[in-house]
Image (spheres, rainbow, N blue to C red):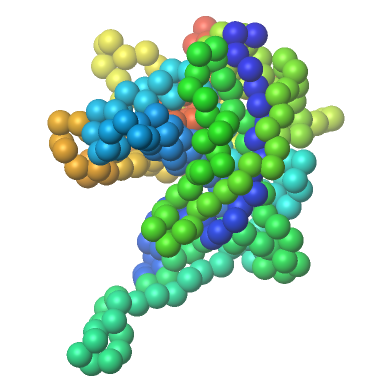
């Protein structure tokens, strides 16, 4: 292998909000940590650690340079909640019973001091993944996988000072690593649902399943459509059935001078929880989004039409 695979288990120490959509006055959360969120948190932490004691961490060009290093030398899966510190996921976010066990909400409002009451129209609720299960009070962990190329930034110490998701100013999203395990080549991931398949970069994962499984859940967003011209290589995946959603995020670009002011182009993706036929493989693309693997590009699995 030209890279090393690590299973990472994080203990969730505070509520965590991974923004999804707003319904009424409720800001909903995703039930997992996306690759973009992990990429952003690692980029921020690694940049600040590198600049500490040397110069203020306010130059967006420094963050862009570190973000490109993370893209080039690290890849990662999405991270999922579990109550097992060894990393076995028994209940996926799309399964019945997940929401009442892991998700709760926090209500807040702005105050109108002259009236000694709530400011009109500011009542809101923020949904979050709880650091303890709501039914039994068990600690909640997050499990996922990190793939490291030689020369990658020193990401493991950064996990001890990482905050994931939104509402970080209130202390949300704090995590603490409890397990970072180097895995052998082609060892099954997520308890046998996927395996690593290629020694090239970026990593390729194959839907493996167990016993007679004919399909497994999709465990990341996967490109469902290409916006292409004659010079664009098709990256949309095949062999997937499920919900489709546009995937967007906020970006910081050096020439704009403001953090998070730009919105990325929408990428049309299959949502996590979609069904994947066993034997289908995916390449891990930027921000942990899965793309068409080299095997699919050669026509080994289906055609390119979503």
Q: Position of residue 37 (x, y in %)?
A: 45, 41
Query: Residue 30 placed where, x, y %?
Result: 51, 52
Residue 141 at x, y percent in the picture: 67, 49
| Front residue of this view, candidates 156 and 262 | 156
* Viewer-nearest residue: 110 or 48: 48
Residue 29 visible in the snapshot: no
Direction from residue 197 to residue 283 in the image, left or right: left
Residue 113 in sight from this viewpoint: yes
Question: Relative to residue 155, is residue 287 drawn left or right?
Answer: left
* Left-right relation of 238 to 69: right
In the rendered view, tell whether residue 58 sits above or below residue 115. above
Work out which residue is located at the far front of the displayed protein and give it: 53
Which quadrant of the structure image shows residue 261?
Answer: top left
The residue drawn where x is 73% and y is 22% is 183
The outermost residue toward the right is 211
Instruction: Identify the residue at image location x=80%, y=31%.
Output: 210
């Amino acid at each position: 292998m030209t890279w090393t695979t690590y299973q990472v288990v994080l203990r969730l120490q505070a509520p965590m909000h991974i923004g999804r959509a707003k319904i009424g006055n409720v800001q909903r959360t995703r039930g997992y940590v996306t690759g973009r969120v992990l990429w952003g948190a690692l980029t921020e932490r690694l940049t600040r650690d590198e600049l500490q004691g040397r110069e203020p961490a306010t130059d967006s060009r420094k963050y862009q340079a570190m973000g490109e290093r993370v893209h080039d030398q690290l890849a990662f899966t999405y991270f999922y909640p579990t109550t097992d510190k060894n990393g076995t996921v028994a209940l996926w976010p799309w399964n019945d019973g997940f929401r009442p066990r892991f998700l709760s909400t926090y209500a807040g409002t702005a105050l109108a001091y002259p009236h000694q009451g709530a400011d009109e129209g500011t009542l809101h609720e923020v949904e979050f993944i709880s650091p303890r299960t709501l039914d039994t009070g068990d600690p909640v962990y997050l499990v996922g996988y990190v793939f490291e190329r030689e020369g990658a930034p020193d990401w493991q110490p950064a996990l001890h000072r990482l905050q994931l998701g939104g509402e970080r100013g209130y202390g949300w999203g704090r995590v603490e690593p409890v397990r970072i395990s180097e895995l052998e080549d082609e060892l099954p991931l997520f308890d046998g649902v996927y395996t690593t398949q290629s020694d090239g970069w970026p990593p390729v994962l194959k839907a493996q399943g167990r016993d007679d499984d004919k399909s497994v859940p999709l465990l990341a967003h996967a490109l469902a459509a290409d916006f292409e011209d004659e010079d664009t290589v098709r990256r949309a995946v095949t062999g997937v059935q499920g919900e489709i959603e546009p995937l967007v995020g906020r970006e910081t670009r050096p020439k704009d001078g403001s953090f998070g002011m730009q919105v990325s182009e929408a990428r049309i993706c299959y949502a996590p929880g979609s069904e994947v036929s066993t034997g289908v493989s995916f390449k891990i693309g930027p921000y942990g989004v899965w793309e068409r693997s080299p095997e699919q590009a050669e026509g080994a699995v289906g055609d390119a039409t979503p």
